[in-house]
Image: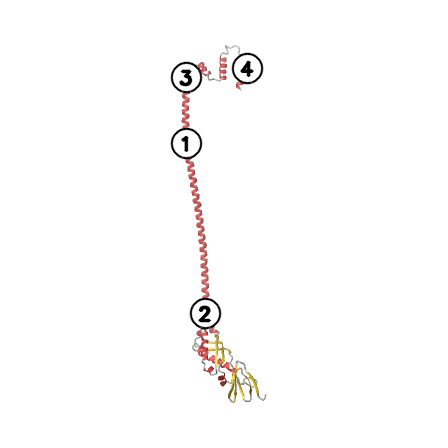
Amino acid sequence: MFGFNYVKSSPSNYVLQYRNGQIVREGVGLAFFYFSARSTLVSVPMNSVDVPFMFEEITRDFQAVTLQGQVSYRIHQPRQLAEQQDFSLLANGSYASEDPQRLPVRVLNAVKAQFRTLLQELDLRNVLQATERLSQSAKQGLSAAPSLISLGIEIGALSLLAVKPNPETARALEAPMREEILKQADDATYVRRNAAIEQERSVKENELRSELLIEQKKRQVRETQVESERVILEKKQQIEVQELAGKVQLEQQNGELVQLQAENQKREADVRAYGLQTTVDILKELDAKSLQALMMGQASPEMIMALGFSNLADNAAKIGEFNFSPDLLKQLAGRKA
């Protein structure tokens, strides 16, 4: 109203109020009324800004690479920036120029120039293998870049996320490593196959060793059995020899016994023959009547009766009649029974 306006800035914005070319008020988070007809407001953002980037550069060996990353910066000298760039505000609160929108581009140009300087001293392999060292060197170079120092800009962080060569170069670079990986894979396959063959050989050797031990045990068992059978056979032979020796000895003893018995029987026969011969010689000199008389003393009653009947028969012509009494027949019959 009547040209007076009210402004209220955030804590991340540095506000400067110019009047007649002189700074009358400045600071962060200010809130005040001002007369727009005689005042100019400048607002410089002091918060950290993250700007992604991706651009292509050439290495020392003339290989194109694409750099992709992010840079963070903030304005730590807002008055210095306000003196060189137009950050003035219009009445509606928007910037009066395009300098605020072009500031990230200026920062990215400084980043690109710094990386171009570094890549001109490095080969492609070194660039691909030294990403972190490259980003650190670029950050140090940007911290001392005159174009940024003059604007009061401070680099907070610089991250190089990817470094990519063109597809043909990438395939050429990958080929040796790919072949090496394939070779390692083949070597691993050969090692695994050799290990498998070695394990199989060990298993077969163990099986053969086990079979050999089993055969040795079986052979020992068979030898033990044969030895046992031999010992048993020897024992049987010894027993048979002992039995044969016993039989031979028994037969010898039987032969000696038979011979002794024969000799004894011969002696007995000789004795009996001698006795009979002696008796016969004696009896030769006796007549029949004398012999009968001699025998009567040792004869049984039947023999005596038989001799009596024999005498009767001899004198039958002289005997006229002979009667047997029933008692005598009965007696004779009873004795015979």
Binning the other alpha carbons within 10 Å of mark 2 as few (below 14), some (14 to 19) or many (20 upward) gives few
Coloring basis for residues? secondary structure
Please say if the residues under marks 1 and 3 sit with CB atoms less than 8 Å apart.
no
Disc 4 or 1, which lies upstream in sequence?
1
**Would you name the residue on which mark 2 appears?**
177
| Residue linked to disc 1 | 253
> Which one is earlier in the sequence, the residue at label 3 or at label 2?
2
Image coordinates of residue 10 in percent, x first then y, are: 54, 81
Residue 177 visible in image: yes
Residue 288, compared with residue 204, is above or below; it is above
Please state which of residues 44 and 322 is positioned toward the viewer in this rendering: 44
- Circle 1 — which element? helix
Task: Give the residue pinned by disc 3.
Answer: 282
Point out the frontmost of discs 4 and 3.
Answer: 4
Report the disc number at residue 327. Answer: 4
Label 1, label 2: how far apart the Cα atoms are: 109 Å
Residue found at x 45% / y 66%? 184
Counting residues from the start of the chain, the first of labels 4 and 3 encountered is 3
Q: CA distance from mark 4 to mark 1?
A: 62 Å
Q: Secondary structure at mark 3?
A: helix
Q: Residues within 10 Å of mark 4 (few under 14, many from 20)?
A: few
Element marked by disc 2: helix
Gap between marks 3 and 2, in whole Å?
150 Å
Badge 4 marks a residue whose secondary structure is helix
Q: Nearer the viewer, residue 38 or 117?
A: 38
Q: Give how far apart the Cα atoms at labels 1 and 3 are.
A: 42 Å
Q: Residue 194: image x %, image y %?
A: 45, 61
Amino acid bearing label 1: Gln
How far is mark 4 from mark 3, CA to CA?
41 Å
